[in-house]
Amino acid sequence: MPGAFDTLTMRGVEEILVLNAGSSSLKCARIEARSGRVLESALAERLGDTSARITLRLDAQVERDEVAGLDHAQALRRVLERFDTTRVLAVGHRVVHGGEAFRASTLVDDAVLEQIESLSSLAPLHNPSNALCIREARRLMPRLPQAAVFDTAFHQSMPPESYLYAVPYHLYEKHRLRRYGFHGSSHRFVAGGAAELLGRPLESLELVTAHLGNGCSACAVRRGESVDTTMGLTPLEGLVMGTRSGDIDPNVFTFLAEHTGATLEEIASLLNHESGLLGLSGISNDMRSVLEREARGDARARLAVLVFCQRLAKAVLGLCAAFGRLDALVFTGGIGENAARVRELTLARLGVLGLKLDPALNAEHGKSSGGRITTADSRVPALVVPTNEELIIARETLQCTVLARAKEPRD
């Protein structure tokens, strides 16, 4: 007799529960994997704080619930009490760091969960929360398959010349000190979206994708695989971000320790939580707020925007070292999709690549031109491709589950 999984799939049901745990947040969504339709969603914010709250979107209605001190496990339980999970096939979890252990998404068992927890030192703000939510979801939904979809997995195709640091090699051999990269699901998704917009096979393209949000990274995608990226051992390396400094001279740690008396932990916190757009502008980590102040003539806001765009353009040029040509530059993420000013200033620094901005198309984010924001005679097109990390997690989870089910012995 068919089980619940077989019965639902035979009916064409492909609902996946997607859980995305941040350091102080939890995003949940029940998604129809094939169509991408979001059936229910929830966002728990400021977890562990007195101002913790949950926003639920159920049947086109929005509900808000404030619960002081709410933690990740409690938030997940509250969400599941409200969600309709009767037709859910599996649970997909975003996991930030998979180290070298995971080159692809995988179903979670005890050994996989232990490995995820063991990698917490590489992503201390995220992996503990990821593991906690996996553990709680397995306890609450023991009969549902659980899959881990890793931010780092897409970048495991990078060659050694891209992922190694120029430090004594034994540090890589013993401690796996290397560059890993992040936002892999997003880079993979928008590279595929760009191929569709260009009407060309992904396997024929050489692309630079720029995921720009509170966290930012750019990636060189050659024939559908990551060959270089801007983030490194942790999500601090690379571009200027909302509160993260991005690339910085490592001797800054010694300099600040000597001149301010700060500890290593305090300096790391400053670079992760007090720097980037927030540190430069003195206004906000949100690009929207910074751009608003720049438009009103605020000099510090303008400086923050210019540094952000200069660093991004420099990274794009550097990533092109992996290619023989560039077929397209792709913008995505909250800033990449919505900040026309950022795209304008960035492309103004990339004329050497033959990128020619169309101001009208850029102002409307390429909505009337299939995502294209450059002129018809631009040697290289620039595209805006909306990302959907939750959808790719849902589809990866479905694929893992179906493959595992196919391998099971049948009576």
Image: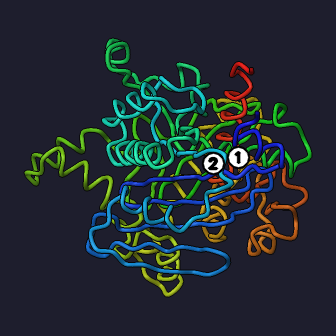
Please say whether residue 95 is visible from this viewpoint.
yes
Q: Amino acid at mark 1?
A: Phe
Residue furthest out toward the bottom: 296
* Left or right of residue 267: residue 182: right
Q: Within the image, what quadrant is residue 153 found in? A: top right
Characterize the local packing of mark 1: few (<14), some (14-19) or many (20 or more) Cα atoms within 10 angstroms: some
* Horizontal side, residue 300 vs residue 389: left or right: left
Q: Secondary structure at mark 2?
A: helix
Q: Position of residue 16 (x, y in %)?
A: 65, 50
SS at mark 1?
A: helix
Q: Residue at x 59, y 74 (%)?
A: 57
Q: Quadrant of residue 114?
A: top left
Q: Position of residue 407 (x, y in %)?
A: 71, 21
Q: Quadrant of the C terminus?
A: top right
Measuring 33% from the left and 75% from the top, which residue is drawn there? 67
Q: Residue 115: percent from the left, percent from the top?
A: 40, 27
324, above or below 286, in the image? above
The answer to whether the residue labelled 1 contacts the one labelled 2, judged by CB atoms less than 8 Å apart, is: yes
Q: Amino acid at mark 2?
A: Ser
The answer to whether residue 125 is left or right of residue 164 is: left
Q: Which mark is residue 26?
A: none
On the image, the x and y values in percent for residue 150 come to 54, 38
Is residue 46 positioned above or below 183 on the image? below
- In the figure, 3 relative to 43: above or below? above
Distance of mark 1 from mark 2, alpha carbons? 5 Å
Instruction: Assess disc 2: are there few (<14), some (14-19) or many (≥20) residues with their C-alpha within 10 Å of its C-alpha.
Output: many
Q: Mark 1 highlights which residue?
A: 189
Q: Would you name the residue on which mark 2 appears?
A: 186
In this view of the protein, which residue sits in the foreground, 177 or 377?
177
Name the image quarter holding residue 171. Answer: top left
Quadrant that contains the N terminus: top right
